[in-house]
Image: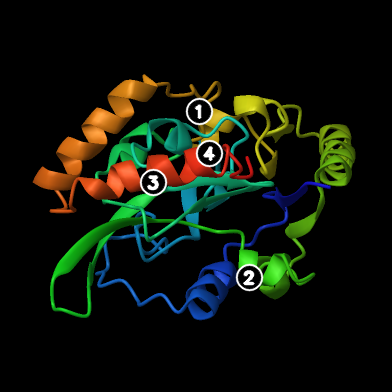
Amino acid sequence: MANAMLIDESRCMGCRGCQVACKQWNDNPAELTENWGSYENPPELSGITWTKVKFTEKVEGDQVKWLFLTQGCMHCTEASCEAVCPTGAIQHHGQYVLVDQDWCIGCGYCVAACPFDAIHSVFETEAGGEQKATAKKCTFCVDRTSNGLLPACVKTCPSGALSWGDRSDMIATGKDRVAALQAGGYARANLYGEDQLGGLHRLYVLADEPSAYGLPEAPRHATSNVAGQWLSGILTAGIVAAVPFWLVFKRQRAEEAQGGGAER
């Protein structure tokens, strides 16, 4: 059974409780920000902010509307970050797309490839005092959800905008909600994520077109040559992250020894 998160943006009130819960559960530090003229803060997702509510002000005639979008990793079936990762650090584990920090070399290819801007690099200080770049993002609270608990953001949402459950059930619930919104006068209401990139595991009920929320109507999947991945991984390890060349080959040999046993 593959689970998914359903976010009904028509019910979101922009409280940002999900942001706080994500920070607290994952022990991520606060962002250093400043007032930039919006209630939306911080302005972007980052390596230490994995969930963020985006505010979009839309003017229709003499009315001003707020559109809220709860941003985070989409855990795509066809994940571009996984496709371009030169060391295999990013892999599918069921519905989860996770980054193995032991194998991440901080090259940033995943950051550039993600069509949703949901994964970012962060510099961390290791035990020896050296700084290492690594990619981080939402994990769907895998330590919670794999033990039968709700993701922290879903658990804390006071308006019931966030749900978690079997993906087919979430799609059915989303479609019912879209039909209700359309019947209530929201002609452009739609369910986003059912088919994009082979199916997203973060689904949205939107009251307007995806582009109004800043979502790509037709996100594209990044592809790369496998042999080129290993070569670029070696170069990146030496130039960018100062990781010994054997790290890349060790990963390849380990996977070959397991007969490609990594769950995808």
Q: Please tell me the numbered disc located at residue 251.
A: 3
For label 1, count other residues whose C-alpha is less than 10 Å away and answer few (under 14), some (14-19) or many (20+): some
Residue placed under numbered mark 4 in the picture? 213
Q: How is the image coloured?
A: rainbow
> Hey, which quadrant is residue 245 in on the image?
top left
SS state under label 1: loop
- Tell me if label 3 and label 4 are in contact, CB under 8 Å: no
Residue at the spot 59% in from the left edge and 37% down from the top edge: 76
At a point 67% along the width and 67% down the height, the residue shown is 151
As helix, strand or loop, the secondary structure at mark 2 comes to: helix
CA separation in Å, label 2 and label 1:
30 Å
Q: Position of residue 163 (x, y in %)?
A: 77, 58
Q: Would residue 219 be found to the left or right of residue 129 on screen?
A: right
Which quadrant would residue 193 be assigned to in this image? top right
* Residue pointed to by mark 1: 216
Q: Nearer the viewer, residue 64 or 227?
A: 227
Secondary structure under the numbered disc 3 in the rendered image: helix
Observer-side mark, 3 or 2, equals 3
Q: Nearer the viewer, mark 4 or mark 1?
A: 1
Cα distance between the residues tagged 4 and 2: 30 Å
CA gap between label 1 and label 3 equals 34 Å
Give the mark nearest the N terminus, 3 or 2. 2
* Number of numbered discs on residues: 4
